[in-house]
């Protein structure tokens, strides 16, 4: 009985269940400590935020009081403004304005340059800026209009106070005092007033709301948090009456704020303690023997698969009597090995057949009407009695078709492709009775470079079909030169014409790596050439399509050097 019990399997779920029951008390302690830490950190964060806002309010209150006193004293007692009277002249006004700006500059040195000052004399309709402007001219005109309207039509209430106002879509706080037709104003934007608070970490969804003492909102730095995330943010009110300010601040801040990292660190510490309590239990030894050790044995046997043959892999035993799951995995794994081996062979053979079929199909995509056109041309020449021309046409045509029917290899010499293109041009010149200015400039040593068959003829046919030269005759040139790419020798074959060039949409598609698909089948030969190059060279080729600045289309094909011996070896391998 003991032996039978020792060989019984133990499910992993049963072992993990016992581990879970052991961890429950530790989890309860962890939740309690985390909750208390969260509450305490939230309280400390709110207290720090309140202290920072209180310091800010006290400083701002003193600054606004000082500016208000300066505005009142200047407009009532400063002799500089006595110059603005009907008895003075424009030169006196200008001098008084300069003196006022000096006085304001001294005040800005202690209160800040963000506070702008303006002076308005309604009897003389003079409005000047007594400080450096921090707004554009359009905003300046709207500020001027606002001040003049407030002087001419006084608002009800206490005028000796800072008043929020929206000017040109931006909120400002301004203080205005009028005495004996002379008005002195101090104005500052809410952004500048609240700028010290923007350095406080309020969280990704935190915001600051600016309200007047009546509760009207004039400014909000960001949208208030909504939904579930709103419960994670505190809303704190800092009333202006309590701080001697003309406005109230409403702040939505992250509950943890700057202490969030401390909470995260404490959370990780407690979580580490939880993990240690599970690891240091006496149940670890049992878990190791019944779970870890069998898995290690299973993994060790599995790693031997790479060094074994298919027959040995199929007979490899991965079972372990201590775990039922590993016994089931062993049976399923053996079936999977057999299936993967069979599928791998089938897929490999299918890919070979598919690639061969695609290459042959693309090579044999020849328009049948070309055969008929050639035969019709020969028949017409014979009917006219021009046997000499018919004989030449028949020779060119037979050479052209003989090459087509023999082009069943992956690669042919470049010289054969050049000769094939020249045969095609001879046929077209005789059939169309038109001269074609053809030239070929390729070094003799490059003529034995192996390229895919029927590659150049595609672009030559494309020129004959679609090129419309601006001159009397069509010009076609084929050039080639060597270059090095990725430490490998390449040849670039360039085909030019003097036609109207390629359409822009065709060039853009080629540059974007797209195939040309049209309803009328135009340019399909170019797409087939690109497909063939990808099948034969993968990413080891270059292809560009562009228009020459002087007119005409330019096709450039860059191919790696392949000599004739490589093609022969390939053909021999196929045989």
Image: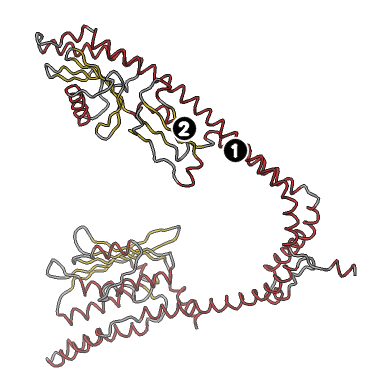
| Left or right position of 110 against 575 | left
Q: Spot the residue most to the right.
A: 1
Local crowd size for mark 1, using a 10 Å CA cut-off: few (<14), some (14–19), many (≥20): some
Report which quarter residue 259 is drawn in: top right
Give the answer, above or below, for where 562 lies relative to 115: below
Q: Residue at x 32, y 66 (%)?
A: 493
The front one of 545 and 399 is 545
The front one of 161 and 208 is 161
Q: How far apart are the alpha carbons under marks 2 and 1?
A: 18 Å
Residue bearing the label numbered 1: 38
Report which quarter residue 306 is drawn in: bottom right
Local crowd size for mark 2, using a 10 Å CA cut-off: few (<14), some (14–19), many (≥20): some
Q: Position of residue 244 (x, y in %)?
A: 39, 20
- Which structural element holds mark 2? strand
Q: Position of residue 67 (x, y in %)?
A: 32, 16
Task: Looking at the image, tell me whether mark 2 or mark 1 is earlier in sequence order.
Answer: 1
| Left or right position of 46 against 121 | right
Residue bearing the label numbered 2: 236
Q: Spot the residue most to the front.
A: 156
Q: Position of residue 310 (x, y in %)?
A: 67, 75
Label at residue 294? none
| Front label number (2 vs 1) | 2
The front one of 313 and 360 is 313
The front one of 171 and 136 is 171
Give the answer, above or below, for where 559 lies relative to 314: above
- Which structural element holds mark 1? helix
- Colour mapping used in the image: secondary structure
Q: Residue at x 44, y 67 (%)?
A: 538
């Amino acid at each position: 009985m003991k032996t039978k019990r020792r060989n019984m399997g133990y499910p992993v779920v049963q072992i993990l269940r016992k581990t879970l029951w052991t961890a429950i008390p530790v989890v309860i302690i962890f939740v309690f400590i985390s909750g208390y830490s969260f509450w305490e950190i939230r309280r400390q964060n709110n207290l720090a935020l309140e202290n920072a806002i209180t310091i800010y309010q006290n400083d701002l209150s003193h600054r606004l009081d000082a500016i208000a006193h300066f505005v009142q004293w200047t407009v009532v007692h400063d002799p500089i403004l006595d110059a603005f009277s009907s008895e003075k002249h424009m030169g006196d006004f200008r001098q008084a304005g300069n003196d006022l700006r000096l006085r304001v500059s001294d005040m800005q040195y202690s209160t800040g340059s963000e506070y702008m000052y303006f002076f308005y004399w309604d009897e003389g309709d003079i409005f000047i800026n007594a400080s450096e402007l921090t707004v554009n001219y359009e905003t300046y005109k709207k500020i001027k209009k606002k001040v003049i309207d407030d002087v001419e039509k006084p608002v009800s209430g206490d005028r000796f106070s800072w008043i929020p106002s929206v000017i040109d879509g931006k909120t400002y706080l301004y203080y205005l005092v009028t005495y004996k037709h002379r008005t002195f104003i101090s104005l500052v934007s809410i952004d500048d007033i609240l700028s010290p608070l923007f350095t406080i970490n309020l969280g990704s969804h935190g915001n600051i709301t600016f309200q007047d003492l009546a509760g009207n909102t004039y400014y909000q730095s960001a949208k208030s948090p909504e939904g579930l995330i709103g419960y994670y943010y505190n809303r704190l009110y800092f009333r202006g009456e309590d701080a001697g300010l003309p406005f109230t601040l409403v702040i939505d801040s992250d509950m943890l704020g700057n202490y969030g990292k401390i909470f995260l660190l404490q959370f990780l510490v407690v979580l580490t303690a939880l993990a240690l309590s599970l690891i240091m239990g006496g149940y670890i030894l049992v878990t190791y023997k019944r779970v870890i050790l069998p898995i290690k044995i299973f993994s060790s046997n599995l790693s031997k698969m790479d060094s074994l043959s298919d027959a040995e892999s199929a007979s490899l035993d991965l079972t372990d009597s201590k775990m039922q799951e590993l016994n089931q995995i062993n049976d399923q794994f053996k079936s999977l090995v057999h299936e993967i081996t069979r599928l791998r062979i089938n897929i490999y053979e299918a890919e070979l057949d598919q690639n061969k079929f695609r290459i042959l199909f693309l090579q044999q995509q020849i328009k049948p009407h070309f055969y008929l056109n050639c035969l019709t041309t020969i028949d017409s020449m014979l009917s006219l009695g021009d046997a000499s021309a018919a004989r030449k046409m028949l020779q060119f045509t037979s050479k052209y078709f003989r090459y087509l029917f023999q082009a069943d290899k992956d690669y042919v010499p470049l010289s054969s492709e050049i000769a094939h293109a020249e045969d095609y041009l001879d046929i077209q010149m005789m059939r169309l009775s038109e001269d074609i200015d053809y030239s070929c400039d390729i070094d003799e040593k490059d003529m034995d470079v192996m390229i895919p068959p029927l590659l150049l003829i595609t672009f030559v046919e494309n020129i004959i079909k679609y090129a419309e030269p601006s001159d009397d005759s069509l010009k076609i040139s084929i050039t080639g030169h060597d270059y090095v790419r990725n430490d490998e020798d390449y040849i670039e074959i360039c085909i030019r014409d003097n036609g109207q060039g390629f359409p822009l949409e065709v060039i853009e598609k080629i540059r974007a790596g797209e195939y040309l698909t049209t309803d009328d089948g135009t340019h399909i030969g170019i797409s087939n050439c690109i497909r063939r190059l990808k099948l034969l060279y993968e990413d080891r080729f270059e292809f560009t399509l562009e228009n020459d600045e002087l007119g005409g289309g330019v096709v450039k094909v860059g191919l790696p050097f392949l000599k004739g011996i490589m093609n022969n070896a390939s053909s021999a391998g196929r045989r």
